[in-house]
C-alpha cells in the first residue's frame, strides 16, 4: 500500500512556524550530527521528509519530536539553511495541537490574534472574579491577603482549576500515548509499564537526555526554569493552605499564603527565593537570546514562545513586588498587585498547560518513558 | 643543404661530474669525424647560446647536436633558425637516472651521441607545405541553432567570413521553440531572447545564411575545403577554411520508452520537449481537454542513464524540469508539482534554480523507477521513495512530463563499417582479397550532415554513444577530422550557457586551424610542426594500409587504390609511415630509415661482455615524458636500455624490430599510451595499432628461433613515471633470463 503524497501539509505547517524546511535536500547531515538521534529513531531528517511528503499519519505516530531538546547543532550544520531544529520545534507544536481533542490548541497556535484574545479574556475574568468575590472587610492597616481572599477559599478555586486542567492535560496525554504507541499499547504487558515507571520520573526531573546535547547551557537554563516553576507550583498549589486543606490535610508550618512572614531561613521562604531566581534568570536568558537571535534555537520565535516567556516573567515579577509590598506592609498595593499577579498567572496555567508550550512537561517525559517501555519490550521479546 | 655538424656537450646540471665528457667528445670527433665539438658548462645560458651562434655565424655550422637536457625543456633557448637541431638527452635520461661515473653510464651517453649523429645524417630541414590553391579563411557553420549562431557571430567578430547552413526554413533550432529559458546565473526563469540573436546573425554582413539548406558535399581539407550547399534545388559552392559542426540533437523517441512510464497510455503523459513545443504560446493546460493543470508530476531520466535506452545523462533535463515546474507554479501558485528524480543534477550555479524550486514548494521524490498508472481519465504515479523507504503515490494528476534525453544528430544513419561488412558478405569473391580486418574501424554513420568525400567515410567518426567528440579533457573541441570542430549538443548534451561557451571554443579552434594551415604547419597536437609525409609513389603496392589506418582520414584513394594524401588534413603523427610495409612514406626529419640508422648506431657489446642491450621505443607525448620525470625524481633504472622517442607509437614500423634483433639487441620494449574507450593516445589509435602490429611479430620471432618474450608492449601515462623504473628493471631481468640474442656479432 503506498502512501499518498500531500503537499498541503507543508502549507498547514507554515502556520505553526515552519519556514525553511522545504529547502531540505535530504542530505542527512542533521541526523548525523545530532547527539540524541539513534539508528532506531533517526531525526530530524526523517521528520522533515514526512513533512515534505505530507505524511500526517506518520508524523502523528512519531515519538522523535519529543526526543529532541533543540540544541541547534543540526541547524548550524545544515548546508541548505533548512533549519531542521526549528522544523522539530514546529513538529512539537503541531503534535500538541493534534493531541488536543478540543481543537483549542490548534487555534491557539495558528492565530496570534486568537492567542492574545484568549489570554486577555481569561485574565479579565479572573480580575473580575477577584473584584467581586472578596471578604467583606479587608484589613487596610496591614497587608493581610487572607483578610481579603482567605486561603481556604482560594484553595477551593485552585482545586477546581487544577482538576479541570488535569482532565484536559491527561486526556491529551492519553491521546499522545495512543498515537505514539499504536497497536503496541495493549500488546506490551502492564508489568513493563510499571517497572519502567522510574524512567518517567527520572526524565521529568533530570532531563538527562538534554545533558547529552553539545550546548549544555541550554540544559541548565531549561532545568532552572523547570525546577523554579515546579517549586512554585508545589508551594502555591499544594501548600497554599499548608497542604490540601479541604480534605483535612494541612500543616500550618508550611502554609504558603499566610499573613505573617516567615523568618529568612525558613525553608518555604528559601524555596521561594530559589524559584524566583531560577525562573527570572532562565526566562531573562531566553528572552535576551530570542531578541538577539544568539543561538539557532532562538532564531525563530513563534508567538506562543514569546507569550510563554512574557507571562512567566510577569508572574514572577508581580510575585516579587507582592513580596516587597508585604515586607513593607503596604496593604493596598499588595492587594492590587495580587490581582494583577493572578490575572497573569492563571491564564498562563489555564491556556499554556493543556493547550500550548507547557504541555510538553507531560508529553516529553511520557514519550521518553514509552520509548523505554518499548525498548524493554523488544528486549524481552528478543530473549523469548 | 651541405651539412656541417657541430656537437655541443653541456657539463652543467651534474653532467660533467657524472660523465667523462672528454671521452664523450672523442665519440664525436673520432668515430663521427665531426668537425666541431665543444664543451660548455652552462649551455642554455645566454652566453652558452651565443657560443653556439658564434659557430653558426662564423664556422658555418648548420647541423647542431646538443648533448644536454631533454628536448622537452629549454626548447626556446636552443631554437636556431635554418639549422637542423637534435638534442641528446644526457641529463634526465642518463646522468639523473644512472650511477655517476659508472662505465655503463658512460656507454649509455656515448650510444645516445652515436644515435644522434646517425639521426642528423638522415634528416633534412622541413619545408612548409603550401597547397596549390589559395588558403580560404572562411568558416562554415553547420546548424543554425543557438550554438551555430553563436559560433557564426564569434567567427564574424574575429574577422572571418562565415557561411551558416540551417536545414530548417528559419534560424533558431530547438531553442527557437522555447518560451522561457533557465540559464546562467540560474536565479529563475527568463524570457527567451533568441530572436535578438537571430536578428544579429541575419544582419551581420560577414555571415551568409542559408536556411532550408544542407551541405551536399565537402571535399578537400582545412584551408582548401570546397563545400557544395543546396537550397531549394539550387546549389552554391563555397571555399572554406574550417568547419564548425553545430548540427544539434533530436529528442529520444518516447515510443521506445518502457511501458511503465505510460507514454501513449494517456494524452496527458507528454515529454519535456512536447511541453516546450505545445505550451510555447503561453498557457500551460491539460493536453487532453485544455483545462487548467493543478497536479503535475515530472519524471526525470525517462530512458536515460539506462543501458537499454540512452546510457548517458543528457545533463539539461533536471534544469529543464525545474524550469517547467516553476512555469507551472508561476501560472498557479497553488498547483501541486512533483519532481521524481534519480539524482538531481544541477551543477554549479544551477543549484540556485533547484533551491528556488524548493522554496516555491515543489515536492521532490527520489526514486529509481517510478510507474505511471493511467486508466481512462485518472492519472497517477507510484514511486518507491528511497529516502522514505516506502512507496508513495501521487494521485489525480493532470499531466505527467517525462524527461527524455538528447540524441546527437550524428547518431542517425547507417554505420558505414556495417555497410561494408554486409557488402563483403554478399560479395563472396572479395573475401579472398587482402585482409584488413584487424584494423579497428571507427563508427561513421551516414547522417547527411557534411557528406565528406573522404576515403574513410562521409561524416565525423563517433566515439561513445555516437557523439563525434574526442577525448575532451586532453583534446578539447577536437574531432577526428582535422579542421572540423563539433560544438553544442551534437558534441555532448548541454544547456544554453555551456553551448555558448562551446561555440566560442570551437570557433577558436577553427581559427587556429586556418592560421596554422596557412603557415603550412600542423594543428593540434603537433602544433606548428612544418614537416609532412611524402610518398615515394613509384614503390607503392596499393595495399591500402595507410589509407585505412590514418586516424584522421587524411589520405584519400584513387580508383587504383593509390593513396592521395591531403596534407592540410594531416596531423603528422606518422601512423601511415608505421603502417606502410614498403616503407615509402617519410618526413623530412622523421623516417623509417632515420630510426633504423639510429638503431644501427647503438654499440652492441659482444656476448661475453654480459652487457645486453634493450631498445625502448617510447611515445614522446607521454612515455618519454614519464622517463624524464623518473630522471627528474632521480629514480635509477637499468643501464642496458637505449631510448628512441617516437612521434606516436603508431608510427612504429615493424622493420625496426627486425633491424634491432638482427643487430643483436636482446630485447625491445614499446611504451605507448592507453588505448580503448578512454584512450589517451594523442593520435587516437596509434598505440592500439602498434599493439596490433606487434602481435604479428611473435610469429616472425618464432620463425627466427627467437623467444617472444624479447618484445613487449606496455601502456604508460605520464603519471606512471614512478612505476616505470620497475617496469624497465623487470623487463631487463626477463631478458637476462632469456639469455643473449644469438644474432649478436653477425
Image: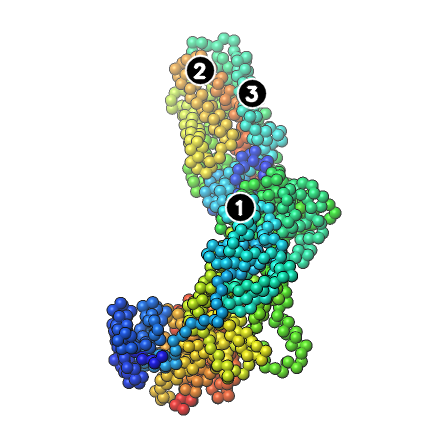
Report the residue at 67% width, 80% height from top: B428
Chain letter, disc 2 residue:
A
Pointer 3 with pointer 1, Cβ within 8 A: no
Q: Secondary structure at mark 1?
A: helix
For label 1, the residue is: B353
- Of badges 3 and 1, nearer the viewer stands 1
Disc 2 versus disc 1: distance between alpha carbons? 63 Å
A6 relative position to B481: left or right: right
For this orientation, the residue located farthest to the right is B376
Q: Secondary structure at mark 2?
A: helix
Report the residue at 57% width, 66% height from top: B218
- For disc 1, the neighbor class at 10 Å (few under 14, some 14 to 19, many from 20) is many
Disc 2 versus disc 3: distance between alpha carbons? 23 Å
Q: Nearer the viewer, residue B190 or A90?
A: B190
For label 3, the residue is: A121
Disc 3 versus disc 1: distance between alpha carbons? 48 Å
Pointer 2 with pointer 1, Cβ within 8 A: no
Please tell me the numbered disc located at residue B465: none
For label 2, the residue is: A334
- For the C terminus of chain B, the image quarter is bottom left
Chain letter, disc 1 residue:
B
Report the residue at 58% width, 49% height from top: B320
- For disc 2, the neighbor class at 10 Å (few under 14, some 14 to 19, many from 20) is many
Q: Is residue A120 above or below residue B447?
A: above
Amino acid at each position: 500500500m503506498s502512501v499518498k503524497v500531500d503537499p498541503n501539509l507543508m502549507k498547514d505547517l507554515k502556520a505553526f512556524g515552519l519556514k525553511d524546511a522545504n529547502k531540505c535536500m535530504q542530505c542527512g547531515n542533521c541526523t548525523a550530527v545530532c547527539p540524541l538521534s539513534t539508528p532506531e529513531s533517526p531525526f530530524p531528517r526523517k521528520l522533515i521528509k514526512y513533512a515534505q511528503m505530507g505524511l500526517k499519519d506518520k508524523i502523528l505516530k512519531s515519538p522523535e519530536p519529543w526526543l529532541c531538546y533543540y540544541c541547534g547543532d543540526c541547524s548550524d550544520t545544515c548546508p541548505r539553511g533548512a533549519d531542521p531544529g526549528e522544523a522539530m520545534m514546529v513538529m512539537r507544536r503541531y503534535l500538541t495541537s493534534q493531541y488536543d481533542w478540543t481543537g483549542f490548541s490548534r487555534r491557539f497556535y495558528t492565530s496570534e490574534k486568537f492567542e492574545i484574545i484568549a489570554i486577555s479574556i481569561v485574565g479579565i475574568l479572573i480580575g473580575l472574579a477577584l473584584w467581586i468575590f472578596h471578604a467583606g472587610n479587608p484589613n487596610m492597616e496591614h497587608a493581610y491577603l487572607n483578610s481579603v481572599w482567605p486561603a481556604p477559599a482560594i484553595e477551593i478555586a485552585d482545586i477546581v482549576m487544577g482538576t479541570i486542567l488535569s482532565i484536559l492535560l491527561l486526556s491529551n496525554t492519553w491521546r499522545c500515548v495512543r498515537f505514539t504507541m499504536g497497536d503496541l499499547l495493549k500488546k506490551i504487558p502492564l508489568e513493563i509499564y510499571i517497572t519502567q515507571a522510574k524512567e518517567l520520573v527520572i526524565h521529568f526531573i533530570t532531563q538527562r537526555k538534554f545533558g547529552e546535547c553539545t550546548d549544555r547551557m541550554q540544559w541548565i537554563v531549561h532545568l532552572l526554569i523547570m525546577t523554579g516553576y515546579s517549586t512554585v507550583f508545589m508551594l502555591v498549589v499544594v501548600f497554599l493552605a499548608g497542604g490540601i486543606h479541604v480534605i483535612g490535610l494541612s500543616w500550618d508550618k508550611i502554609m504558603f499564603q499566610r499573613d505573617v512572614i516567615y523568618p529568612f531561613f525558613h525553608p518555604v521562604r528559601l524555596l521561594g527565593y530559589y524559584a524566583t531566581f531560577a525562573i527570572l534568570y532562565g526566562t531573562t536568558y531566553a528572552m535576551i537570546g530570542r531578541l538577539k537571535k544568539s543561538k539557532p534555537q532562538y532564531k525563530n520565535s513563534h508567538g506562543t514562545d514569546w507569550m510563554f516567556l512574557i507571562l512567566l516573567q510577569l508572574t514572577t515579577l508581580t510575585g516579587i513586588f507582592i513580596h516587597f509590598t508585604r515586607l513593607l506592609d503596604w496593604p493596598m498595593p499588595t492587594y492590587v498587585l495580587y490581582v494583577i499577579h493572578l490575572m497573569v498567572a492563571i491564564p498562563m496555567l489555564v491556556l499554556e498547560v493543556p493547550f500550548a508550550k507547557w504541555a510538553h512537561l507531560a508529553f516529553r517525559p511520557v514519550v521518553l518513558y514509552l520509548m523505554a517501555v518499548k525498548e524493554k519490550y523488544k528486549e524481552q521479546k528478543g530473549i523469548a | 643543404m651541405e651539412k656541417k655538424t657541430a656537437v655541443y656537450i653541456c657539463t652543467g646540471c651534474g653532467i660533467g661530474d657524472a660523465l667523462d665528457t672528454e671521452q664523450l667528445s672523442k665519440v664525436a670527433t673520432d668515430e663521427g669525424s665531426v668537425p666541431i665539438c665543444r664543451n660548455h658548462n652552462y649551455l642554455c645560458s645566454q652566453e652558452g647560446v651565443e657560443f653556439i651562434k658564434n659557430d653558426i655565424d662564423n664556422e658555418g655550422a648548420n647541423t647542431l647536436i646538443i648533448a644536454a637536457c631533454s628536448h622537452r625543456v629549454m626548447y626556446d633557448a636552443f631554437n636556431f633558425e635554418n639549422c637542423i637541431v637534435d638534442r641528446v638527452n644526457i641529463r634526465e635520461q642518463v646522468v639523473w637516472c644512472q650511477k655517476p661515473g659508472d662505465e655503463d653510464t658512460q656507454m649509455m651517453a656515448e650510444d645516445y651521441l652515436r644515435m644522434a649523429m646517425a639521426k642528423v645524417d638522415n634528416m633534412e630541414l622541413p619545408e612548409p607545405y603550401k597547397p596549390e590553391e589559395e588558403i580560404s579563411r572562411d568558416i562554415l557553420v553547420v546548424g543554425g541553432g543557438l550554438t551555430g549562431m553563436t559560433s557564426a557571430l564569434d567567427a564574424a567578430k574575429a574577422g572571418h567570413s562565415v557561411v551558416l547552413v540551417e536545414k530548417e526554413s528559419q534560424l533558431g533550432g530547438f531553442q527557437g521553440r522555447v518560451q522561457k529559458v533557465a540559464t546562467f546565473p540560474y536565479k529563475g526563469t527568463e524570457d527567451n531572447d533568441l530572436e535578438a540573436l537571430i536578428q544579429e546573425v541575419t544582419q551581420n554582413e560577414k555571415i551568409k545564411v542559408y536556411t532550408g539548406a544542407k551541405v551536399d558535399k565537402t571535399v578537400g581539407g582545412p584551408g582548401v575545403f570546397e563545400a557544395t550547399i543546396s537550397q531549394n534545388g539550387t546549389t552554391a559552392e563555397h571555399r572554406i577554411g574550417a568547419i564548425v559542426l553545430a548540427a544539434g540533437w533530436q529528442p529520444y523517441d518516447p515510443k521506445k520508452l518502457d511501458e511503465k512510464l505510460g507514454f501513449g497510455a494517456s494524452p496527458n503523459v507528454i515529454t519535456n520537449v512536447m511541453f516546450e513545443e505545445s505550451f510555447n504560446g503561453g498557457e500551460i493546460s491539460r493536453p487532453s481537454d485544455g483545462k487548467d493543470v493543478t497536479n503535475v508530476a515530472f519524471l526525470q531520466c525517462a530512458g536515460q542513464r539506462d543501458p537499454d535506452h540512452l546510457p548517458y545523462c543528457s545533463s539539461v533535463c533536471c534544469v529543464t524540469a525545474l524550469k517547467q515546474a516553476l512555469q507551472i507554479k508561476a501560472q498557479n501558485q497553488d498547483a501541486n508539482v512533483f519532481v521524481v528524480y534519480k539524482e538531481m543534477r544541477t551543477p554549479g550555479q544551477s543549484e540556485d534554480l533547484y533551491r528556488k524550486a524548493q522554496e516555491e514548494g515543489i515536492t521532490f521524490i527520489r526514486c529509481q523507477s517510478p510507474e505511471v498508472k493511467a486508466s481512462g481519465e485518472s492519472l497517477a504515479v507510484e514511486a518507491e521513495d528511497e529516502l522514505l523507504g516506502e512507496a508513495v503515490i501521487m494521485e489525480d494528476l493532470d499531466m505527467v512530463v517525462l524527461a527524455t534525453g538528447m540524441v546527437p544528430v550524428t547518431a542517425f544513419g547507417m554505420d558505414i563499417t556495417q555497410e561494408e561488412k554486409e557488402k563483403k558478405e554478399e560479395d563472396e569473391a572479395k573475401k579472398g582479397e587482402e585482409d584488413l580486418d584487424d584494423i579497428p574501424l571507427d563508427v561513421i554513420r551516414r547522417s547527411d550532415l557534411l557528406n565528406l568525400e573522404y576515403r574513410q567515410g562521409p561524416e565525423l567518426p563517433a566515439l561513445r554513444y555516437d557523439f563525434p567528440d574526442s577525448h575532451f579533457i586532453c583534446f578539447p573541441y577536437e574531432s577526428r577530422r582535422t579542421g572540423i570542430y563539433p560544438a553544442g549538443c551534437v558534441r555532448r548534451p548541454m544547456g544554453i550557457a555551456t553551448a555558448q561557451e562551446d561555440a566560442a571554443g570551437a570557433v577558436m579552434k577553427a581559427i587556429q586551424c586556418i592560421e596554422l594551415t596557412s603557415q603550412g604547419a600542423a594543428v593540434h597536437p603537433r602544433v606548428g610542426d612544418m614537416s609532412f609525409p611524402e610518398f615515394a609513389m613509384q614503390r607503392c603496392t596499393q595495399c591500402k594500409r595507410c589509407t585505412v589506418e590514418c586516424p584522421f582520414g587524411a589520405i584519400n584513394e584513387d580508383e587504383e587504390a593509390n593513396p592521395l594524401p591531403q596534407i592540410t588534413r594531416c596531423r603528422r603523427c606518422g601512423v601511415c609511415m608505421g603502417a606502410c610495409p614498403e616503407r615509402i612514406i617519410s618526413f623530412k626529419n622523421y623516417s623509417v630509415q632515420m630510426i633504423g640508422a639510429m638503431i644501427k648506431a647503438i654499440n652492441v657489446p659482444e656476448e661475453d661482455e654480459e652487457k645486453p642491450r634493450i631498445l625502448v621505443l617510447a611515445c614522446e607525448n607521454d612515455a618519454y615524458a614519464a622517463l624524464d620525470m623518473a630522471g627528474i625524481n632521480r629514480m635509477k633504472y637499468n643501464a642496458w636500455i637505449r631510448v628512441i622517442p617516437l612521434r606516436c607509437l603508431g608510427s612504429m614500423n615493424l622493420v625496426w624490430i627486425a633491424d634491432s634483433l638482427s643487430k643483436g639487441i636482446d630485447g625491445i620494449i614499446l611504451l605507448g599510451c592507453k588505448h580503448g574507450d578512454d584512450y589517451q593516445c594523442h593520435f587516437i589509435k596509434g598505440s592500439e595499432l602498434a599493439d596490433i602490429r606487434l602481435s604479428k611479430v611473435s610469429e616472425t620471432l618464432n620463425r627466427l628461433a627467437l623467444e617472444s618474450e624479447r618484445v613487449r608492449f606496455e601502456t604508460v601515462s605520464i603519471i606512471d613515471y614512478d612505476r616505470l623504473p620497475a617496469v624497465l628493471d623487470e623487463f631487463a631481468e626477463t631478458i637476462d633470463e632469456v639469455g643473449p640474442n644469438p644474432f649478436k656479432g653477425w
